[in-house]
């Protein structure tokens, strides 16, 4: 993993780091079977496993659900503002 290589190059122990996870929303909820995990869900679970494996604690997260997220990240402070937006249907009508 690129991040771990960079941390090693900088001589930073990954367990000194904290993670904030965002994303994994289902952008097209009406296009996929309800019982199958979405790519976003798989990515979010993989991120959790990798971080846990390397001892990196998750201090904030906004994962999954429907739609996409708009994120503002202040690099200087580490603060993150997130807003989740529901998906647009583009004229797809739900069946009765």
Image (spheres, rainbow, N blue to C red):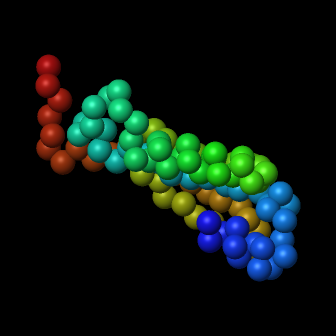
**69 vs 1, nearest the viewer:** 1
**81 vs 59, nearest the viewer:** 59
Residue 13 versus residue 43 in the image, above or below? below
Extreme-top residue of the structure: 96
Residue 68's x, y, as percent? Answer: 42, 51
Extreme-bottom residue of the structure: 9
In this rendering, does residue 33 appear at all? Answer: yes
Q: Residue at x 40, y 36 (%)?
A: 37
**2 vs 78, nearest the viewer:** 2
Quarter that holds the N terminus = bottom right
**15 vs 5, nearest the viewer:** 5
Is residue 96 rendered to the left or right of residue 22? left
Residue 45's x, y, as percent? Answer: 55, 43
Residue 17's x, y, as percent? Answer: 80, 61
Q: Residue at x 40, y 47 (%)?
A: 39
Is residue 20 rendered to the left or right of residue 18? left
In this rendering, does residue 75 appear at all? Answer: no
Residue 8 versus residue 31 in the image, above or below? below
Q: Count how many numbered circles sit on residues in the image.
A: 0
Residue 76's x, y, as percent? Answer: 75, 74
Is residue 82 rendered to the left or right of residue 67? right
Q: Residue at x 84, y 65 (%)?
A: 13
Is residue 16 rendered to the left or right of residue 1? right
Quarter that holds the C terminus = top left
- Image quadrant assignment for residue 49: top right
């Amino acid at each position: 993993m690129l991040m771990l290589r960079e941390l090693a190059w900088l001589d930073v122990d990954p367990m000194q780091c904290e993670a904030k996870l965002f994303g994994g929303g289902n952008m097209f909820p009406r296009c996929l079977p309800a019982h199958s995990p979405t790519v976003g869900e798989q990515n979010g679970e993989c991120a959790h496993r990798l971080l846990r494996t390397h001892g990196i604690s998750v201090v904030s997260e906004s994962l999954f659900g429907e739609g996409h997220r708009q994120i503002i990240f202040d690099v200087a402070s580490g603060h993150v503002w997130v807003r989740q937006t529901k998906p647009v249907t583009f004229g797809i009508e739900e069946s009765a």
